Image (cartoon, rainbow, N blue to C red):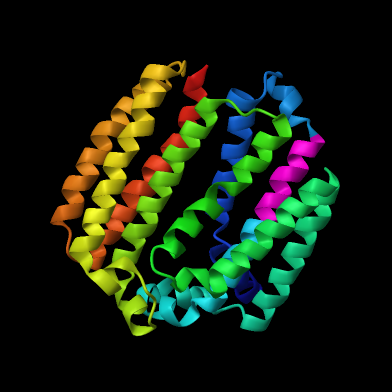
Amino acid sequence: MKKITLLKIVSLFSVVRGYNIIMVCIAQYLAAIFVLSHNPWHTILQDLSLLMLVTAGALAIAGGYIINSFYDKDKDLINKPTKTMIDHLVSQNTKITLYFLLNILSVIVASYVSFRAVIFFSAYIFSMWLYSHRIKKILLWGNITSAILSIIPFFAVFVYYRNFQKVIFVHAILIFLLILIKQLVKDLQNIKGDLTHNYATIPVVHGETTAKKLISIGVFTCYLPITLLIYHFKIGNLKYFLLFLIFYLLFFLLMLWKSTSQKQYIHLHTLLKIILVAGVFSVILTR
């Protein structure tokens, strides 16, 4: 009995991608401490309103992952059979119940901060449902929307601190581009399931070569915000991470054009995950 309960907990953690949510929460706090606020770190950690914002975002994101998993269950059985079998340890009815519960809790938690926070997270929750239900299957718009939804929780923190410096938006554009590239690589990785279930992705509609060309354009576009950040803003030692990123992305491009199998595309996807996680902690270098 205890083993079954433990497996179901692991399954739920897998469905809501708990590791991703933890990283988002860490990223929000690091951004608040090293970029957005001039208050001491212990004051920021004791800020209950910030905690409520981060918690509301985490709950909403968890709900978003659940509804996305619900709509993608058949496709994921082809693309990610092992993970999907683990996810199926929890019934679909339980997932939907948890989805509504998490969204309600998100709005309730947001109400502690302000009514505007309630509106913000309500709109965010609706947008994630709309993405999973309809937008995801629209050519390219699915990728763009997914990347936008990934960075929206950070804007809640930006607005909270009323910090709208240009450097923050340039950094946000770079993160958006990296996430968009990751989404396009994921389409290459998931081409079998997408093709079987009529998902209109770039590799399915236009082929793998076109997808690689689009990813390459995305990588070279990353160099614009990187250059702006290095030469036009005071970012401290973060410039060394960005210089490393220039060569990292060149290596990624080389591997991209050599890749032809799902296993190789999974490795590319992992490379992008690693640099995004490294980017989260690189914020520490700004001071």
| Percent of width and height locating residue 274 | 38, 44
Q: Is residue 245 left or right of residue 94?
A: left
Can residue 189 be seen from the camera position used here? Answer: no
- Please give the range of residues in magenta: 48-59
Q: Please, is residue 269 above or below residue 195 in the view?
A: above
In the rendered image, residue 92, in percent from the top left (x then y), is placed at: 62, 81
**Image: 266 above or below 218:** below
Taking the image as shown, residue 172 lies to the left or right of residue 162, namely: left
Instruction: Please tell me which residue is depicted at 41% across the width and 74% down the height of the picture.
Output: 82
On the image, the x and y values in percent for residue 246 come to: 27, 32
Q: Is residue 142 left or right of residue 10?
A: left
Compare residues 57 and 137 and report the one nearer the observer. Answer: 137
Quadrant occupied by the N terminus: bottom right
Q: Residue at x 58, y 24 (%)?
A: 34
**53 is within the stretch colored magenta:** yes
Q: What is the chief secondary structure element of the magenta stretch?
A: helix
* Residue 273, x across and y down, in percent: 39, 48
